[in-house]
Image (cartoon, rainbow, N blue to C red):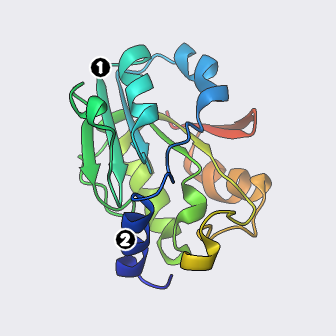
């Protein structure tokens, strides 16, 4: 996958498969539930499972952003704000959400868009962010789409030290997820 159009087409096709049906946030839910946030943006939301959990357990204002949005119909009826868009141009005002999350998303970003994506996440986030990042190759649909994890050479220490520590007050690994406090 070389350009944004090809990436969008690939994920639109993936939505016709069972891809994106996993709920990658499960082991982080007890930690996230302790945070006092009034709003959350989940980037790379897929089918919207984390947004549904957040709406039921965390806060009333929930956004889900994905380049190829395909939320489950029952989630759309719950007042979750689903946005079809790209992470390097988030259509929300500055500091409009308390927390931004992503689960197995950042490794899918084209390297040309990583810096802009991180800056956009910081721009829209008031308090904190939580990200789970996979560092190995993807295992699904390689024969049809090629490698889906476009950034895989970096381990957790890269994401902590070079990506998130420079933008936050505190960055820490929690069960392999990266938590960053912004204020």
**SS class of the residue under badge 1?**
loop
Q: Is residue 47 left or right of residue 165?
A: left
**Where 94 falls versus 174 (above or below)?**
below
Q: Which is nearer the eye, 102 or 24?
A: 24
Residue at mark 1: 60
Q: Residue at x 39, y 59 (%)?
A: 16
Q: Residue furthest front?
A: 17
Residue at mark 2: 8
User: Which quadrant would residue 80 be assigned to in this image?
Assistant: top left
Q: Residue at x 34, y 49 (%)?
A: 65
How busy is the neighbourhood of tag 1: few (under 14 within 10 Å), some, or many (20 plus)?
some
How busy is the neighbourhood of tag 2: few (under 14 within 10 Å), some, or many (20 plus)?
some
How far across and how far down the image is residue 173, in percent? 74, 37
Residue 99 visible to the viewer = no
User: What is the C-alpha distance between the residues marked 2 and 1?
Assistant: 29 Å
Q: Which is nearer the eye, 181 or 10?
A: 10
Q: Is residue 174 left or right of residue 51?
A: right
Q: Which is nearer the eye, 155 or 16?
A: 16
Q: Is residue 121 left or right of residue 109?
A: left
Q: Which is nearer the eye, 18 or 23?
A: 18
How far across and how far down the image is residue 6, in percent? 40, 80
């Amino acid at each position: 996958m070389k350009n944004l159009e090809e990436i969008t087409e690939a994920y639109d096709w993936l939505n016709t498969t069972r891809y994106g049906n996993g709920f990658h946030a499960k082991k982080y839910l007890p930690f996230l539930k302790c945070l006092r946030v009034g709003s959350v943006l989940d980037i790379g939301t897929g089918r919207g499972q984390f947004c549904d959990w957040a709406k039921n357990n965390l806060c009333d204002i929930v956004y889900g952003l994905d380049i190829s949005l395909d939320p489950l119909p029952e989630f759309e009826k719950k007042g979750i704000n689903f946005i079809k868009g790209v992470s390097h141009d988030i259509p929300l005002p500055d500091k409009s959400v308390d927390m931004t999350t992503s689960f197995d998303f950042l490794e899918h970003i084209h390297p040309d868009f990583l810096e802009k994506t991180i800056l956009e996440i910081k721009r829209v986030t008031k308090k904190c962010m939580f990200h789970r990042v996979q560092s190995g190759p993807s295992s699904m649909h390689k024969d049809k789409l090629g490698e889906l994890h476009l950034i895989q050479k970096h381990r957790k220490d890269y994401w902590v030290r070079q990506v998130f520590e420079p933008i936050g007050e505190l960055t820490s690994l929690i069960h392999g997820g990266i938590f960053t406090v912004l204020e």
